[in-house]
Image (cartoon, grey):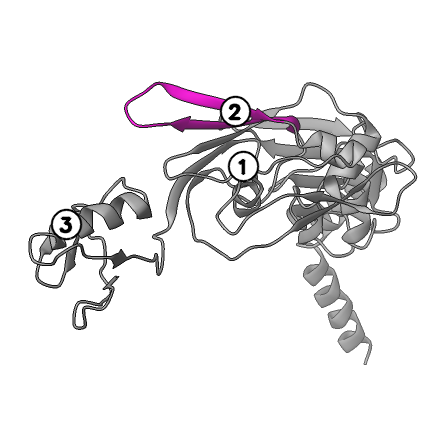
Amino acid sequence: MSVFKVPGYEGTAEVIADGTASFPRIGSVPVAGLTLDQARQRIGAAYGRYLRRPSVSLDLVYARPMRITVTGEVQRPGLYSLDRSGSFQLESAGATAGSSQPTTIQASGWPTLVEAIQKAGGITARGDLRAVVLKRRVGSGPQQELLVNFWEALRDGQQIDNPILFDGDVVMVTQADTFSYEDLIKIGSSTFAPDTIGVNVVGEVVRPGVIRVRANSHLSNAVLAAGGFVKERASVGNLQLFRLESNGTVTKKEVRFSPSDPLGSDNNPALREGDVVVVNRNRRAAVNDAVRATLEPVGPIINAASLLRLLGAN
């Protein structure tokens, strides 16, 4: 803040928790909820008690983080704080059919709807970009909702407005009813999806454990990323997929390894963050393991008896 041609009045003031800012001579001035121009007029009116026609200049040095809520089909739903990050232009991986030009989504320097989705880890495999809901309450009025269709940008290369977020906004990514194989591939390669997701592959694979695969990868990709099956031990037709649902329940699905099946099919479902893929033993390996476990306690006795016979023979 500065006052034109009045030295000694310039300074930087912070808006504290009660919504006021302190300035030279006039003290605390309530500025919460005002635009910069409204705050400038109020401060100028306060200085008018001491100065004749004061010309006040007011600039915003730094805005406090905006507190928003992101919910629905995102990887990490919850409460987030978003800072102003400078102007940028977001380019998605989708493009118009027959065109190599990337889709451009307009964005400004203030936190935007797309930025909020990215902050929450991107959408899940069930997220519907056709119906992203932005909820906002203005003052004491009723809550307003804005429906944004980002799918048009990915599918047709249309230019879609990317709304600027306000403090207290709620972003909800709805659940899609159905998606085709092509839809899942396009979304998985866009900036709306996370770069990778963590999947735990256990059982008869070469490198069991948590692996990172691209978003919306299918189950066969996870098996291959874990080094593939252990030869002569894995049951290709007996895989299990465990998934923690949003309501806290765990679902179990029996599948068989079929990499030729399309993404999203029964035997090649799209994976989500935290999925567990279990590759079971085949029947032969199970029998061999059972026999080995049975004979292991007897092994030392047999070896000792053989040693005694050898000693007796000498």
Residue 232 sits above or below residue 4 on the image: above
> Would you say 207 lies left or right of 87 here?
right
Query: Considering only order in the chain, which callout, 3 or 1, is on the residue closer to the N terminus?
Result: 3
| Residue 29 colored in magenta in the image | no
Q: Is residue 20 visible?
A: no
Q: Amino acid at mark 2?
A: Leu
In the rendered image, residue 96, in percent from the top left (x then y), is placed at 84, 37
Mark 2 residue element? strand
Give the residue pinned by disc 1.
Answer: 163
Can the viewer see residue 235 in this picture? yes
Real-space Cα distance between discs 1 and 3? 31 Å
Q: Which residues are magenta?
A: 127-148
Residue receiving disc 2: 146
Query: Which of pointers 2 and 1 lies earlier in the amino acid sequence?
Result: 2
Q: Which amino acid lies under the numbered mark 3 shown in the image of this protein?
A: Val
Q: Nearer the viewer, residue 112 or 180?
A: 112
- Distance between the alpha carbons at the discs numbered 2 and 1: 9 Å
Q: Going 75% across and 36% down the picture, which residue do you hit?
A: 154
Marks 3 and 2, the one that precedes in the sequence: 3
Question: Given the current orientation, which residue lies at the most extreme front position?
Answer: 52
Overall secondary structure of the magenta stretch?
Answer: strand
Q: Are marks 2 and 1 in contact (CB under 8 Å)?
A: yes
Residue holding disc 3: 29
